Image: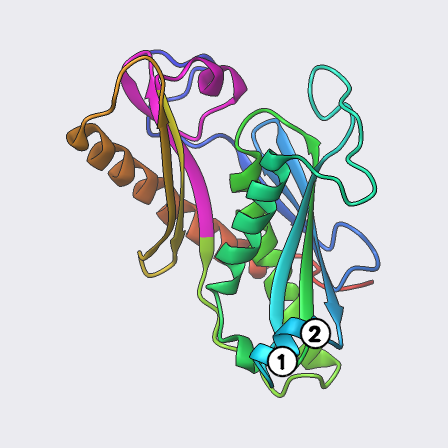
Amino acid sequence: MTRIDGRRPDQLREIRFTRGFTRYAEGSVLSEFGNTRVLCNASVQDRVPAWSRDQRPGEGWITAEYAMLPRATHDRSGRERDGKVGGRTQEIQRLIGRSLRMSLDLAALGERTITLDCDVLQADGGTRTAAITGAWIALHDALSWMVGQGMLKALPALQPIAAISVGLFRGDPVLDLCYHEDREAGVDGTVVMTGDGRLIEVGFTAEGRPMGREEMDTLLGLAHGGLVTLWAMQRAALETGLGGPR
């Protein structure tokens, strides 16, 4: 089978993580999955929401916001203003926050909040997977900054978190769908997993016909293979380049 962009069915797009992409954020990463580009900024605040302080005394909090910027797609979309965000935006930012909270013991933060702002500069499919995978690196860099500032004694144990899309395109299982593949896919989904192989999120949607269990197992296996590569790329990114504010 020939894919739209010529890749093998199990081949990721060209992926790149640029650390220290903005000057002021405690952690900043430009996450690129092919033509999808998401800016992930991590900000540290020396406080937690009131509800967290009451329900989880002594613990920190990790949350996320997600936005598709105007002209990130073929047509200009309006900005989501005044706290009014669409259902898709709410779903994705909750997924990002929920995923990243799985990476460490929140008690290690003390009563501090780390917010991951994930802004889509250019969209060509897989914006949520690029956001989650890049935001994890930004989170790592924010934690390293906290160590440097004396806010933490040492870097907390941090479980790698990455995400990838899979689907059935013209009947064949494929990895890391671009926009046109996603639009035509009979099944498309997102898999989020920890670096030791545990699942955080598995979401599949079928169009045209239901998906069989064997097909789902095939897609999960395909996703795991891609995630192994992404975890290695995250590790490699942390070994090079700038991480915190400059």
List x then y, in percent, for residue 195.
Answer: 38, 59
Assess whether mark 1 and mark 2 are in contact (beta carbons under 8 angstroms).
yes
Quadrant for the C terminus, please: bottom right
Task: Name the residue tied to disc 2.
Answer: 50
- Judging from the image, what secondary structure is the residue with disc 2 in? helix
Q: Is residue 213 rendered to the left or right of residue 219? A: left
Depth check, front residue: 180 or 49: 49
Question: At x 67% / y 66%, what residue is drawn?
Answer: 114
- Judging from the image, what secondary structure is the residue with disc 1 in? helix
List x then y, in percent, for residue 188.
Answer: 39, 26
Residue 243: quarter of image: bottom right
List x then y, in percent, for residue 222.
Answer: 29, 36
Task: Name the residue tied to disc 1.
Answer: 54
Q: Give the residue type at disc 2.
A: Ala
Is residue 234 covered in magenta? no
Q: What span is in magenta? A: 162-186
Question: At x 80% / y 52%, what residue is drawn?
Answer: 22
